[in-house]
Each structure stands twice: as structure tokens, then as C-alpha cells.
Image (tube, helix red, strand yellow):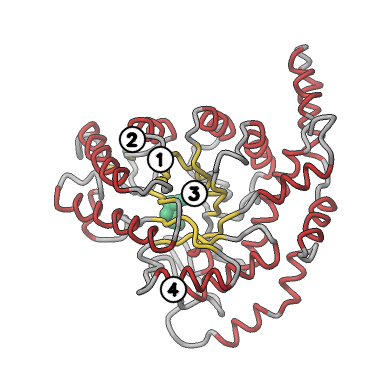
Amino acid sequence: MTAGTSKDAVKAALTTQTLETPSWAYGNSGTRFKVFAQPGVPRTTREKVDDAARVHAHTGVAPAVALHIPWDRVDDYGALAGYAAERGLRLGAVNSNVFQDDDYKLGSVTNPDPAVRRKAVAHLLECVDIMDETGSRDLKLWFSDGTNYPGQDDLRARQDRLAEALRTVHDRLGDHQRMLLEYKLFEPAFYATDVPDWGTAYAHCLALGPKAKVVVDTGHHAPGTNIEFIVATLLREGRLGGFDFNSRFYADDDLMAGAADPFQLFRIMYEVVRGGGFTADVAFMLDQCHNIEAKIPAIIRSVLNVQEATAKALLVDADALAGAQRTGDVLAANEVLMDAYSTDVRPLLAEVRADMGVDPDPMGAYRRSGWQESIVKERVGGEQAGWGA
Ligand code: PSV
Ligand code: MN
């Protein structure tokens, strides 16, 4: 916060940040070893929307829910959008899925077999058709494509195939639609991943045009990677499309955002504030799976963690920081940042919530709401949604 920035300005900025929660986080999930089913988990996409509406009701800042196709395939997407709107939500990014089919064993859009590539591209185009019906702006692309062994396939040819597929999809986008290309260091491919890092994603986006942006999944980096540097660079280049927020201790753990490293989340949010990310159409999405904890309150907690990091970032005294940086006062500059990080922003956020007509204590309010007990009682029978359905 600059000397002249009022508390009201910080509060106002906080209300402009909205988050998208992932439909799949409400369903059952697990590891390669075990999916632990939980009582009350949604059976349908509409029930996932119901749960997302609870998160929004208790936080006031999560008015969108992202879909994953085919996990959220329905007969009538317009009707689904209407159902969401009745609950105060909109349908957010459409996440494509070209990673759960036997045909994709050797890759999807980079597969050496043109027939498999055609099938993958057809799915991506279907996702854009769905966006037309849901009114979604963003198509999120993540490819599990890669190779396990040196020599398995031609690294350069795979990039060419990727570029061709991306071009087809990009050309199909409507005027107000965007494609967000997600990178991931490794997994499931172990030797070479076709989109392993922000540089590769950025190079493809640059070649495609302004509708193509990079999405930063915070879990998809090597330990020690300076993610805020990537964020600053992409914002500077006008190519940061959004975030998949989550936390990681080791790899792509998909834990609650801010759980493992709240300081990193603050540093990222500081670069978002610094780079004008609130006005640059950055999509703040969560991409998490709650395997052992209750899902809805875990998502509420994640939203609160992102909000707390944002509030602290907004509180950085920009003038004092710039002054210390100008004079090369290393310790003073660091202190300005740490002062903001060390601020207890919970009272400020409680005020923001009260102003929005939301209970200042979202976790407590959810516990008291009786929603958890009601879904456990009512959602009996049928097939629970899960990672893959
Ligand atoms: C891949 O690890 C990823 O981050 C992509 O965003 C997928 O769509 C999502 O996870 C599935 O949970
Ligand atoms: Mn992701």
C-alpha cells in the first residue's frame, strides 16, 4: 500500500478479486494408490454446482465454477448455466481432458498417429462448442503428452504436431474466448514432457496470437522454482491467462492453496498486484483435490488463504519499497515486504465480508449451516462423482 492508499482502497481491491473453484474438487479423489470415498459427495454436475454455490455463499468471492469435460458432460449446457445462475454462479473455464483414454497412451495432440491426433483435436473443439453454450471465456488445455524413454519419439516433431493442433483450436475461438495453455514439469511422462515449462507454453502462445495465454499451476514446478518471477514475466508480456492455485510439498500434491507455503503465495500475489493483474483479466482458479479432508470447507479455506495473501500483497507500502530499492537499502526493502506479510489481515477481511453481507467467519458459518449434514443425509444412492467421472 502506498502512503496515500487508504484502507478503503485495499478493501475495494479485495472485492474485485473473484475466484473460480474446480468442479472436480467436490468429487472423490485420491492418489495412484487409493481413492477414499466421502459421504455426501455429489453424484451429478448440478450437485457439484450446489456445493460451489455454498463456497460462494460463505466467502462472497467465488462466483464461478470450472468444468472438466468429460467429467461434467451434460445434455444441455445452457440449462446447466441457468441452474448455476439461479444459485448466483457462472460457469467458468472449460477444462479439456485428453488424458484418460487408451488411445492416448503415446500422447494426444502430439501422438505419432494422425488418427489419434484428430480425435484429440475433435475433443478440444467440442470443448469450445460447450463454451459457446455455457458462456465460458476460457478453454484450459493441459496435455499429459510426453515420452518415457530417450528415442521413443521425435522431440521436434511432437512440438510441430502440438503447434498444429493448437492453431486449429485457436482459430475456432470466438472473439471473447481465450485458450489457456498449462505446463507441467513432469508426470505422467517421465523422460520428456511436451509442455514442461512456462517458456514452451509462452513460445506456443506467442506464435498463436493474443487469445492464447499461459496458465500457471502452482504445483507444476521443480522445488525451488521462483514462481513469482514467472508470474512477473508473463504479466509483463501480457500473457498471464490465470492460475491453477494449489499447494505442494513434493510434486503436484494438489493440496489447499497456501497450505504448504503461504509466503510463496504472498510473493506471487505481490507480483500480481505489482503487474496490474487485477485489471489484466487474470483468472484466479483453484485446481485441488481433497483426498483426506472434507471437501467444501477445504475449498473455503483455500479461498480464504488466497484472499489473505492478496490482502497482504495489497498492503505492501509501494512508496517505501521503491525508496529503499532506489537507495540500495537491502534490509529496509526486505523489511517493507515482510511488514506487509506479517500483518494480521483477518480483521480487515472480516470487515470486507461484513460489508459484502457475508458472515465474517466463513469456516464457522459453513460448520453452523448444516449443509454438510444435509448432503450426507440426502445424497444417498447413485454413483458418486470422482476423478474420472
Ligand atoms: C494436471 O495435473 C492438472 O493440473 C490439469 O489442470 C488437469 O486438468 C487437472 O490437473 C486435473 O485435476
Ligand atoms: Mn492444473
Does the residue at mark 4 contact the one at mark 3 (Cβ under 8 Å)?
no
| Cα distance in 3D space between marks 2 and 1 | 8 Å
Q: Which residue type carries mark 3?
A: Asp
| Cα distance in 3D space between marks 4 and 1 | 27 Å
Does the residue at mark 2 contact the one at mark 1 (Cβ under 8 Å)?
yes
Q: Which residue type carries mark 4?
A: Ala
The dot on residue 208 is 2
Query: In which image quadrant can residue 1 be found?
Result: top right
Disc 4 designates what residue? 79
For numbered disc 3, what is the local secondary structure? loop
Near mark 1 (Cα within 10 A), the count class, few <14, some 14-19 or many ≥20, is: many
Q: Which residue type carries mark 2?
A: Leu
For numbered disc 4, what is the local secondary structure? helix
Return the disc, 2 or 3, that comes first in the chain's sequence: 2
The structure residue drawn at horizontal position 55% and vertical position 52%, both measured from the top left corner, is 285
The structure residue drawn at horizontal position 62% and vertical position 41%, both measured from the top left corner, is 278
For numbered disc 2, what is the local secondary structure? helix
Near mark 2 (Cα within 10 A), the count class, few <14, some 14-19 or many ≥20, is: some
| Cα distance in 3D space between marks 4 and 3 | 34 Å
Query: In which image quadrant can residue 389 be found?
Result: bottom left
Return the disc, 4 or 1, that comes first in the chain's sequence: 4
